[in-house]
Image: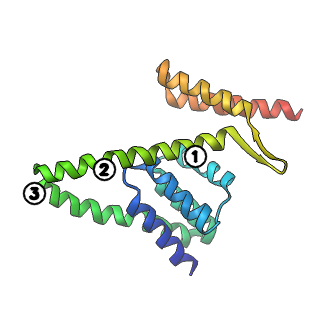
Amino acid sequence: MTLLQLFISFFQVGLFSVGGGYAAVPLIQDQIVDSFHWLTVREFSDLLTIAEMTPGPIAVNSATFVGTRIAGFPGALIATLGCILPSLLLVSALGVAYRKYGRLYAVQTVLATMRPAVAALIASAFLTILLNVVFVSEPAGQKVDVLATVLFVGALVAIRVRKKNAILTMLACGVLYTLSHLLIQF
């Protein structure tokens, strides 16, 4: 039953995550955190970090990770297949249809009306990640992680304003955060 749940959950993610990786984040969270409780919110935040750092789409990386965690190698295979199957089928069908009808006004209108929904999904993913970075859940309640917040703002300025290399910025943030926690422990 677990393999079927993994397949159906990630099939839904693959089917409804229009707009790519960040648009899929709220859908993935709904399935693996809210619906099935396979991961906690904090584990989900860690999953997103790992899924972004590894090559490949976030949804597929998430499916593989969660599948492995829940049911080992068969779970990884089933969850990943569930995630990519809708795209495989839809893109194949849409490719044929777009080639034939892509210049029609109605097709262009449908594509234009999907853009705001995709932007909303991406904004939702951004807010989810931001809240998981800024706020840390503790037994006494929510606490602001000042260091993570400072690194977030610094990385945002470095990448968006100063046009620094995103990979080097990510590595620098990881090193600084790790060093600060090592220094705090000693």
* Residue matched to label 1: 128
Element class at badge 2: helix
Which callout, 1 or 3, points at the residue further toward the start of the chain?
A: 3
- The label number, if any, that marks residue 114 in the structure image: 2
Closer to the observer: label 2 or label 3? 2
- The label number, if any, that marks residue 100 in the structure image: 3
Closer to the observer: label 1 or label 3? 1
Name of the residue lying farthest toward the bottom: 1
Check the image and report above or below for 175 versus 87: above
State the scheme by which the image is colored: rainbow
- The label number, if any, that marks residue 182 in the structure image: none
Give the Cα distance between marks 1 and 3.
Answer: 39 Å
Residue 153 in sight here: yes
Element class at badge 3: helix
- With 90 as the anchor, is 170 left or right in this view? right
Q: Percent from the top left, x then y, of residue 57?
A: 44, 50
Name of the residue lying farthest toward the right: 186
Q: Percent from the top left, x then y, of residue 166?
A: 50, 29
Q: Which of 78 and 39 is in front in this view?
A: 39
Q: Nearer the viewer, residue 28 or 104?
A: 104
Element class at badge 1: helix
Q: Residues within 10 Å of mark 1 (few under 14, many from 20)?
A: some
Label pair 2/3, CB-CB below 8 angstroms: no
Q: What amino acid is labelled 3 in the image?
A: Lys
Residue 56 in sight here: no
Identify the residue shown where x is 46% and y is 47%.
22
Q: What amino acid is labelled 1 in the image?
A: Thr
Check the image and report above or below for 34 versus 106: below
Q: Residues within 10 Å of mark 3 (few under 14, many from 20)?
A: few
Label pair 1/3, CB-CB below 8 angstroms: no
Identify the residue shown where x is 41% and y is 56%.
17
Q: What amino acid is labelled 2 in the image?
A: Met
